[in-house]
Amino acid sequence: MVYTGVLTKMQTEFLEPIQYYLVFENDFIHINQLLNKTIDLKRVGHQCLSCGLDRPIYRQGFCKTCFFNKPLAGDWIMRPELSTAHLGIEDRDLEYEKNVQLKPHIVYLANSSNVKVGVTRKSQVPTRWIDQGAHEAIEIVEAPNRYLAGITEVALKDFVADKTNWRTMLKNDIKDEDLLEWRHRLKSHIPEEALPYFIENNTETHISFPVSQYPEKPKSLNLNKTQQYSGKLVGIKGQYLIFEDNTVFNVRANEGLVVDLSI
């Protein structure tokens, strides 16, 4: 059976283990049901997630024009501390930016390859942690807007990592951490204006992924360089498909590619 569609990040369901779904315009695939089966992936084109045109993907699923012009790709997306909607200042589209930035945001600690600090909209918990391949996570601040969450993240970067090592995460070369202790340790470094939103009492969230075999030396598949690939699927973690031959495919990093997926 062959499915054809535009890659977007896999949708997830917070169960034990996480359930993954690849959604195309006319089909959806329950990826967990493909475990231990051979999958063939073939790039057949591109489709910008914003304008929908067949143009080379520049970043984040967008063509170059859309990446530099559309509000969905503003700098504040990756750097929340640059948010200005709370001041009524427009970056690219003030109404869009208000709708996203002026919502509750969570500053969290997650352990995927190491303990890291991050920011996400409250509505994206625990999806954000799942996408990062975190096996444990905890909220530490619930801010009323993206800016306050962003400056909190920046302040904590001096004391805890802010990036995930994807190879370590995929090899499962990780250890459990006491995130409650981490939260207590970092409290004194939270900016004064964000301190009223510190979360005193909550517990860790634990996440398990459907993986039967972790790669010893992960090799990243890039469909722009290797147009077609075939392999046996042995796991799913974060936004990665893990294959028996140590090949891993980051679905989110390949958003905007039009693919044939054969089973």
Image (cartoon, rainbow, N blue to C red):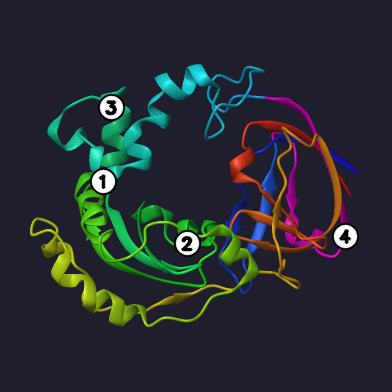
Tell me the number on the disc at residue 37: 4
The residue labelled by disc 2 is 129
**Numbered disc in front, either 3 or 4:** 4
Amino acid identity at mark 3: Glu
Q: Is residue 122 magenta?
A: no
Please give the name of the residue rendered at 27% of the width and 74% of the height, measured from the top-left corner: 183
Mark identifier at residue 146: 1
The image shows residue 22 at horizontal and vertical percentages of 69, 47
Please state the total of marks drawn on the protein image. Answer: 4
Can the viewer see residue 261 in this picture?
A: no
| Disc 1/disc 2 C-alpha distance (Å) | 18 Å
Q: From the viewer's perspective, is residue 172 above or below residue 30?
A: below
Q: Is residue 41 magenta?
A: yes
Answer with mark 3 or mark 4, whichever residue precedes in sequence: 4
Q: Disc 2 vs disc 3: Cβ atoms closer than 8 Å?
A: no
Identified by mark 2, the residue type is: Trp
Q: Residue furthest front?
A: 217
Distance from label 4 to label 1 (Cα)? Answer: 42 Å
**106 in relation to 109, above or below:** above
Identify residue type, mark 4: Lys
Which residue in the protein does label 3 denote?
95
Magenta span covers which residues?
Answer: 25-46
